[in-house]
Amino acid sequence: MKKTTLACLILSLPLSSLHAEDSLNDQLRRAAEKLKNEFSKVKEQTEVKGREWYKKAKEHLTTSREEYLKKAGDALTRWKADIDVLKDQVGREYFKTRIKALEEHHAFAIKEMETLNAVTEEAQFRARQKSFDKTLWTLEAAIEQAQEEAGL
């Protein structure tokens, strides 16, 4: 009985490995297709986000200084609150480093806003505004990434 069972087992191994190879190929094909779909989603999201930022930049250039600075200040206040919430979520050591980087980025944005606020000439204000917009957008993206990682 043992010999018969062992013989059946030995004979079934090549058949099961052949099936496993087909299964592995199918799994690899499905994984590649899933990866391709994920890349497509990321590409679409990037294109949408890029168009969104471009549209905001155009809007910002036509917005009055006072309104622009008020909106920027409100956004910085909101993002500071988001950073504080993330700070409460800190558990892993490397995440503390990310929070510290967000705080430094936020502080840099505050100083850049103060500099922008002190500019008196309209042309110089608009030129500096472009750089400040990039600072705001990168801060916003960094906060969103940290929130996603923290599961918020």
Image (cartoon, helix red, strand yellow):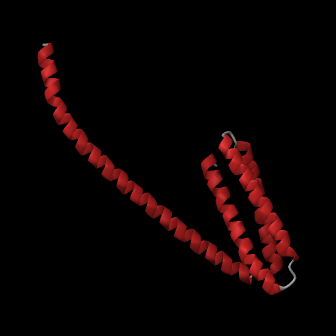
The quarter holding residue 136 reads: bottom right
67 in relation to 22, above or below: below
Q: How many marks?
A: 0
Q: Is residue 132 left or right of residue 31?
A: right
Q: Position of residue 127 (x, y in %)?
A: 75, 81
149 in relation to 118, above or below: above
Report the residue at 36% width, 56% height from top.
33
Report the residue at 61% width, 52% height from top.
148
Please indicate, yes or no, whether residue 115 appears anywhere in the rendered image.
Answer: yes
The N terminus sits in image quarter? top left
113 in relation to 29, above or below: below
Q: Position of residue 112 (x, y in %)?
A: 80, 69
Report the residue at 74% width, 43% height from top.
88
Q: Is residue 15 left or right of residue 120?
A: left
Q: Is residue 78 left or right of residue 31?
A: right
* Depth check, front residue: 133 or 75: 133
Report the residue at 77% width, 56% height from top.
104
Please indicate, yes or no, whether residue 77 appears anywhere in the rendered image.
Answer: no
Q: Is residue 81 left or right of residue 37?
A: right
The quarter holding residue 61 reads: bottom right
Q: Position of residue 13 (x, y in %)?
A: 19, 31
Q: Position of residue 89 (x, y in %)?
A: 70, 43
